[in-house]
Image: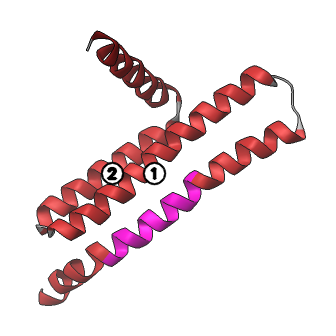
Amino acid sequence: MASYLRSVRFALSGISFALRTERNMRFHCVAGAAAIALGLWLSLTALEWCLILFAIALVICLELVNTAIEQTVNLISPERHPVAKAAKDVAAGAVTTAAVFAIVIGLLVFGPPLWTIATQR
């Protein structure tokens, strides 16, 4: 049990590092919190919550992986190198792809109820 708790502490330390050092991580967390607040206001169904929470988790997890890759590449190749750049760009592309699809999921889930509210006024 002590080794599990130590692992959890290490993981939380990594999340904390990313929040402190990565502007995009903070942005994704704020956007996720806003989506959760909007979901609470709209009383999402269980399936809608699953989609929204999955999209938020995917983006945040990929941002954490992107941060890990960037830190590793910086350690291994502190000077500019085309292969190091490619590794960083591909990792950033994964986050961007997930974020775009999260936006699409948000539009599909939040769009209809927001449209109904807007047209009733």
**Which image quadrant: the N terminus?**
top left
Q: Mark 2: which secondary structure? A: helix
Q: Mark 1: which secondary structure? A: helix
Mark in front: 1 vs 2? 1
Image coordinates for residue 12, horizontal then vertical, percent:
37, 24
Image coordinates for residue 76, horizontal then vertical, percent:
78, 22
Q: Is residue 115 left or right of residue 19?
A: left
Q: How is the image coloured?
A: secondary structure
Give the residue number, with chain letter if any, for mark 1: 59
Residue count near mark 1 (Cα–Cα under 10 Å), binned few <14, some 14–19, many ≥20: many
Q: Which segment is the magenta one?
A: 95-108
| Predominant SS along the magenta part | helix
1 and 2 marks in contact (CB < 8 Å): yes
Give the residue number, with chain letter if any, for mark 2: 32
Q: Quadrant of residue 53?
A: bottom left
Q: Is residue 94 left or right of residue 9?
A: right
Task: State the residue at coordinates (43%, 45%).
Answer: 60
Residue count near mark 2 (Cα–Cα under 10 Å), binned few <14, some 14–19, many ≥20: many
Q: Quadrant of residue 112?
A: bottom left
Task: State the residue at coordinates (37%, 49%).
Answer: 57
